[in-house]
Image (tube, rainbow, N blue to C red):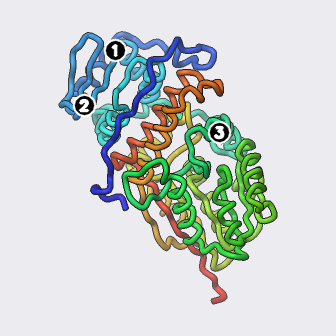
């Protein structure tokens, strides 16, 4: 499904204008980055110029000089600040520099796609070998223990239901859609989300009378759709905002008697189910808890049961190189988050469960289109985002997050998988 001929061209990103002064109370590290020595800035500038010179980019500095092989434009408005941030904090500094308006791109996704495509070689090999000396370490507070996971989830998913409703379609589904054809249009997104959900429910053979456990409720669309098939659904979430709205939506659909939503960690789940479904929740689990996540699927499944899991994946060598470092995404978007690799999923399932992997299907190009539609909608509704109390720095942060994610899928650096796991019934 992710062949090159189905991958649409990257479209202009319409980045937000340079923000007003950054609020130091809300964004302390963006307003006032840690100081960096002039020597470190100089080394960073030299390394980045060498890197940019071999990429299909046009990097233009404030003095009008350019570097690169030609391609999408990256404009560095404040080279001193840009090099200081990148030299001091790597990709965190790169992201904070964008939030501060120190660099921009007329087509942000195109620039980020080039960078994502070359992610493995952006940092010279000698510096990569010294990664442990310069890369920031992930804060201990972001570990996804039961208490830590609640705090991490709340920071993203409890921002505001109204915010998410501004750029998601009417299904309020916050994961990759599955389109009939690419490229896609906004009008097709809701149907594509239902197609994705239905495929997962079909993989898990959810039907009338099925006992279903959902790990990661979102805003309830999958639970509602499973209940409409006649299943009885127990869904787990750590987000109070999501739980409240999901319960309202289930009631509006007349399915409250078939949908139960618990404010509960997956490790606290009890009972036995015919099917377990989990959509893009493993990304919030953390590597040290992946075995426990898959053991939960195994423990909760009845003999003969089926588990359908949708997961974003990254290359294994990049995952192992970066799994302990602190990233911009973890600092600002998904605290505690880490994408697994296909190999890491296979190891966790094979080494820690009795589950069997029946199939795995990738749909990365479909996620790129999903993200493009969300990003364009978010940009179009910028005034409404502001009216909810989110400032220009937040809007640039989320523009970068959505564009960065889209670029990951367009470049092939990221993929999204639908897995089917089965549990043998020894009685047969």
Residue under the image location 28 percent in, 16 percent down = 61
- The residue where tag 1 is placed is 79
- The residue where tag 3 is placed is 152
Instruction: Name the residue nearer the viewer: 226 or 356.
Output: 226
Neighbor class of circle 2 (other Cα within 10 Å; few <14, some 14-19, many 20+) is: many
The residue lying furthest to the left in this view is 69
Residue 264 in sight in this render: no
Point out the image quarter for the N terminus: bottom left
- The residue where tag 2 is placed is 57
Residue under the image location 48 percent in, 47 percent down = 186
Q: In the image, 401: left or right of 141?
A: left
- The x, y position of residue 160, in whole percent, is 67, 35
Residue under the image location 77 percent in, 67 percent down = 271
Give the alpha-carbon distance from disc 1 to disc 2, as whole Å.
17 Å
Occupied quadrant, residue 132: top left
Q: In the image, 392: left or right of 388?
A: left
Give the alpha-carbon distance from disc 3 to disc 1, as whole Å.
33 Å
């Amino acid at each position: 499904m992710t062949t090159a001929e189905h991958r649409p061209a990257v479209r202009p990103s319409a980045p937000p204008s340079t923000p007003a002064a950054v609020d130091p109370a809300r964004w302390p590290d963006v307003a006032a980055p840690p100081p960096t020595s002039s020597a470190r800035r100089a080394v960073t500038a030299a390394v980045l110029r060498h890197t940019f010179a071999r990429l299909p980019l046009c990097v233009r500095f404030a003095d009008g000089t350019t570097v690169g092989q030609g391609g999408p434009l990256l404009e560095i408005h404040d080279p001193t600040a840009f090099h200081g941030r990148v030299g001091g904090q790597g990709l965190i500094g790169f992201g904070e520099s964008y939030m501060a308006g120190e660099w921009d791109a007329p087509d942000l996704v195109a620039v980020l796609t080039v960078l994502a495509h070359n992610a493995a070689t952006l940092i010279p090999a000698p510096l990569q070998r010294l990664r442990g000396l310069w890369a920031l370490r992930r804060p201990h507070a972001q570990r996804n223990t039961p208490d830590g996971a609640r705090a991490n989830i709340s920071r993203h998913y409890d921002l505001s239901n109204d915010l998410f409703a501004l750029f998601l379609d009417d299904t309020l589904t916050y994961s990759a859609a599955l389109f009939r054809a690419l490229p896609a249009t906004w009008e097709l997104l809701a149907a594509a989300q239902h197609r994705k959900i239905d495929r997962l429910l079909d993989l898990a053979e959810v039907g009338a009378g099925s006992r279903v456990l959902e790990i990661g409720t979102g805003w309830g669309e999958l639970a509602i759709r499973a209940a409409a098939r006649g299943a009885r659904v127990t869904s787990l979430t750590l987000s109070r905002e999501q739980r409240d709205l999901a319960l309202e939506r289930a009631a509006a659909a007349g399915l409250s008697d078939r949908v139960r939503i618990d404010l509960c960690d997956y490790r606290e789940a009890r009972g036995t189910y015919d099917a377990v479904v989990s959509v893009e929740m493993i990304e919030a689990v953390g590597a040290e808890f992946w075995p426990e996540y898959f053991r939960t699927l195994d423990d909760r499944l009845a003999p003969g049961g089926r588990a359908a899991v949708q997961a974003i994946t990254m290359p294994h060598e990049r995952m192992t190189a970066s799994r302990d470092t602190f990233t911009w995404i973890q600092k600002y978007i998904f605290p505690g988050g880490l994408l697994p690799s296909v190999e890491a999923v296979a190891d966790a399932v094979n080494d820690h469960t009795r589950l069997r992997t029946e199939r795995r299907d990738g749909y990365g190009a479909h996620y790129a289109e999903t993200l493009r539609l969300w990003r364009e909608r978010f940009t179009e509704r910028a005034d409404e985002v502001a009216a909810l109390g989110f400032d220009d720095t937040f809007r640039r942060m989320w523009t970068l997050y959505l564009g960065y994610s889209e670029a990951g899928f367009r470049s092939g650096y990221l993929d999204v998988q639908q897995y089917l796991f089965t549990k043998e019934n020894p009685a047969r």
